[in-house]
Each structure stands twice: as structure tokens, then as C-alpha cells.
Image (cartoon, rainbow, N blue to C red):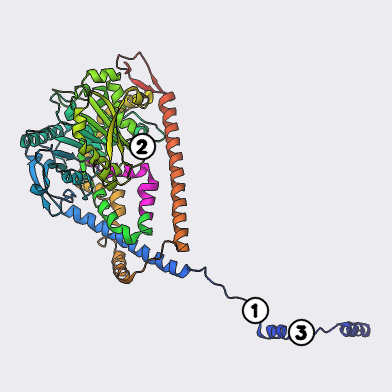
Amino acid sequence: MSRSHKTKAVQLTSERKVVPLAPAHVAAVQSGPRAQPDAEPAQLPVGALPYGRDLTERWILFLDTLRQRADNMREHEQQGMPPLLDFQYETILDARKFDQPANYALLRITVIGDDCWEDCVDETKPPVVVVDPRAGHGPGIGGFKRDSEIGMAMHEGHPVYFVMFFPEPMPQQTLADVHNALRQFVAEVARRHPDTPPVLYGNCQAGWALTLLAADCAGLTGPVVLNGSPLSYWAGEAGSNPMRVMGGLTGGAWAAHLAADLGDGRFDGAWLAQNFESLQPEKAIWEKYANLLSKVDTEADRFLDFERWWNGYYTLSREEIMAITQNLFIGNKLESGEFQIDAHCHVDLRRIQNPMIVFASYGDNITPPAQALGWVPQVYKSTADLKSAGQRIVYLTNPHVGHLGIFVSATVAKLEHRAILESLNEIEALEPGLYEMIIDNPSGDPDCHKPDYSVRFEPRDVSDIGETAQKSTELAHVRRVSEMNEFAYSMFVSPWIRAISNPVSAEVMKRSHPMRLSRMVFSEQFNPWMKFIHTMADGIGKDRAALPSDNPGIIAERAAIKAIGQSIKSTRILRDLATAAVFGMIFRDAVQVSGPENKDGEAVNTATIGV
């Protein structure tokens, strides 16, 4: 380095000013960047650790509840899937032994709690026959707990009978076979109680089965109560009642025919249960499981009781499911008078002379009031027409309860069903006409008797419900397209499917159904990890202390559950609106019917699908 450079370097060094450091800064430099005595350590939010512990415990108990559900399901199947009634009973008639056999049986309820038939029953009161729906699940919805239709009828002193059915139909069983069995059951009950005609209680699909009895060539004498029962299948709004349009988008009845062929002549009821859950996934899937997780300490038993019935899937014969889809869901032949029971008799709703009591709910998206009542203005042109026919129709509506709540809700059983049973004499005494049954309950307590609540019957005009059930041109097109597709499938595809189907393939298909597989995956038999969950749940249950409901974590969890549920609901609403729009575009604009229509409004020539 030159002398000048050294001089400059010295000058620069000498010009630097040394600034003394504070003691704290000296310590920081000496100890490195980690020494920060003034910094506060990071802390978890208040209550986070207790909430994390509580959530972990609840999650383990939640999984263990699903394990118990799977084990209950397996046990129920191993027992032969008997009816899930919370009452003792005896078998009166077994229709499997009839000359025209069917997989049905008539039971008599003998014991309720600690009371037997002799302690509860007033023989002067009319017998009540409860019939459960055969719509995928097994029998028991009308009486799997004390506060139910059967329980209320027994508490009111009525002799109670129950119509059950077995998991598998008889070979080639038809609706005519079932109709004949029900006819013999009613005759047997009437024989045992000759002084008072029986009251027939039909839930959901069982309602139209009882209506067939009332409207066939023999008819009935006692009142029929229809709970959430569809009789007018084309009524309702497509956006809010999507079930009535889904059959059209799948091409009609051929899909059910295919499923029955693949099942070796049996239609698996799990398909119907899956359809029900898909209608409102925010309730049937999300809210059900979220509610179990958040309240597993108190809701596990109630959840298991209901799931024991919900997951018992029964089958229908190919002949039955085809008759149901073609004549009712798609054909809508019940209200039009085209339903042919057998070669000797067809159904005519104008034949009905016994009182009809219709119970529907505005919260029911499976059988909305329009489908429960829409047949009235289709059968009777006016109120005068109804009166001249000598008919009495009484309807009762609930503002919010869902479809299953009509049958299983304890509140509904204690108020509406009790009110129906306690008002039978008043209904019998009504003049012919249409009436709305209104319950005034000023106390607000559903578990009460008259005169704590009062019932009045307000006369109504047929025109009051006429606007809810206008005949849909689009659904008439669906009917014709379904007939074409079914004809093509039966001729060209069904024979090949039947040739390759066998009991083994049908059983494999049955066991692999998502509704079964999603349950059985939590069974210890199929999932070894569930034994670990079982052990942990047993340990947790001994000394678990749940967090209070005002814990910040619990409050945030409830808000998240509600937000997610609302998001699923919004998506489902958009799905239903889009489905309705697509359905309208296809069957309003694309389906052209050539030729004139006959007097029944059907096209004379075959319907064609435009491109």
C-alpha cells in the first residue's frame, strides 16, 4: 500500500466517533440474539387447552358411538331384523302362510311398560291398526319408543294392532298380494271387535296402501288416518320438492328395474334411504353428525335408538318396485283412477265412503301438503261435489316438523296424534264436506288432554287447495318417456342383466352399497382400529367432565357448525333450483308430442325427444 493510502486510512480511522453502549445493549451483544429479557412468551388463548381436551374426548366418544351403531346393525341383521317395537306383542296372522302369500304379519300389542292388555284397553273403543311404510326401512317407526303412535293409542285405551313385514318379499310378490294380506288383516281385527270398525293408521307409503283398501271394490267402513302420505305425486313445487322431478332426469322407471335386476329380482331398500338423505344433506348428514359430536354425552343413546331403525334396510320384489314407480311416482295413476290392482278391480277414490283424516306438514319436503291433499280437487270438482258424494275429509297441518317427525316426534305424538284419537267421535259426527282440524293449546304443553286443549273443525272449500295441485305437462311428458325407456330396457337389456345376475352377485352388490359400507367401516369386525377407540372411550367415560356451554371454544364450535350447515343448505338450494331448471328445459322445450290428445290428456301418438 502507498504512503498516501496509509495516511488516508489513518485519517478515516481517527475521525470515527466511539459511542458508549448502554449496559443492557452490552449484555444483548454478549449473549446473542436469544437474550431478550423484555419480551413476553407466546401464550395460548384462555381456555384453549381445556377445549382441546374436551374436543378430543368428544371425538373419541363420537367414533365409539359410530362403532356401536355398526355393531347394532350387524346384531339386528343376525337376529333376522325383527320389528323394532318398544312394546311386547303376539302374532295374530302370518301372511306368508296365506294362499296368496306376502311377507306381512299382523301383531297385537300386549304389554306397554309394566301394564298388560287388560290393564290398558277399553274394549268399547275402536281398535287402532298402525301400518308402517315399506319404503326401504323396516317396521317400527310407529312404535319404537313409548311416546309414539302406538304408545298414544294404548294410553288412550284403544286396542292396538300393528302390521309388520319381513326383510325379504315372497317370490314374485306383487302389490295385489300385499293388498290381499292387508284386506285379511283388517277383516280379522273387525271380527275381533265387531261393535266398532277399526281405525287404520297409515304412515308415509303405508297411507296409499290403506287408501287402496278404501277405494277398491270392497271399500272400508272405519276412518283412515294418513300421516305424511303422498296420494298426488305430481303436485308440489319442483324447486322445493325435488323428488317429483328426479325420476324424469334419470329417464323414468327403467333405473329401478335395472337395480332390481342386478339384485337378482330384489330391489335394495338402501337406495331409497340414500335418496332420502340426499334431499336435505345439511340435516340428514351434517346436522345429525355434528349434533352428535357436540352433544355426545347426552345424545348418543337417542342417536343409536333412531339409527337402529334407520339402518335396517329391507327389500322389495322387482314386481313391487316396478308397480310403485310406474303407477304412482311417475304414472300418478292413483288420483286419476287408472290404478289397476288386479284383473278384477281398479282403484277409484270416489268410492271412498269412510272418513279420511290427512296429517301433513309444511316442513315435510318428502310429502308436502300439496302431495298429501292435491288429490281432493282432482277427484271432487267442487265442495258441492264432495258433499253430494257423502264424503268427509279432515286435514291437519303442522307448520314446521319434518317428514320423519310426523311419525317419531314425541311432541307430535303427545299433541296431534292424541288429538286425532280423542276427536274420532266428533269426526264421525261431521256432515259431509272438507274440514281443517285446528288445535288450540293455550298452555303450550303438548302433553295434555282435553279440555286443557280444544279442537275445532273449520269448513273449507275444495278450491282452497285447488291451486296447489295443477297438472304438470312436463310430468306427463316424463310418464311417456318413461314408458318408452322401460319398453326398450325390458326388450333389449333386462334379459341380459337377468342372465348374469345370481344370488352371489346380488349379495356382493348389497354389502358394497354405500349406505351399508359407510356404517360397517366403523365395526370392530372390519376395522381393527376401532378396538383401540373402544378401549379409549371406556376410559374416558368413567371420569369425563364436560365443558360448560358458555366456554368460548364451545361457542365458537357451535357458530362454525351453524355456518357450515348454512353453506351446505345454500348449495343444496342451488342444486334443487338448477335441477328444476334443467328438468324444465328438457321436458318443456325438448319433448315434442306429435298428434292430438285423447280425452284423458294423453298423446295419441308416441312421444319423441327433440334434438
Please give the residue where the numbered disc 2 appears in the rendered image.
362
User: What secondary structure is the magenta-colored segment mainly?
Assistant: helix
Q: Secondary structure at mark 1?
A: loop
Quick check: 161 above or below 323? Answer: below
Pick whichever of labels 2 and 3 is earlier in the sequence. 3
Asked whether residue 271 is drawn in magenta, I would say yes
Label 2, label 1: how many angstroms apart (C-alpha)? 64 Å
Please give the residue where the numbered disc 3 appears in the rendered image.
21
Label 2, label 3: how many angstroms apart (C-alpha)? 80 Å
The structure residue drawn at horizontal position 30% and vertical position 19%, both measured from the top left corner, is 382
Q: Residue lying farthest right?
A: 4
Q: Secondary structure at mark 2?
A: loop
Q: Amino acid at mark 1?
A: Asp
Asked whether residue 121 is drawn in magenta, I would say no
Q: Nearer the viewer, mark 2 or mark 3?
A: 2
Q: Which residues are magenta?
A: 263-290
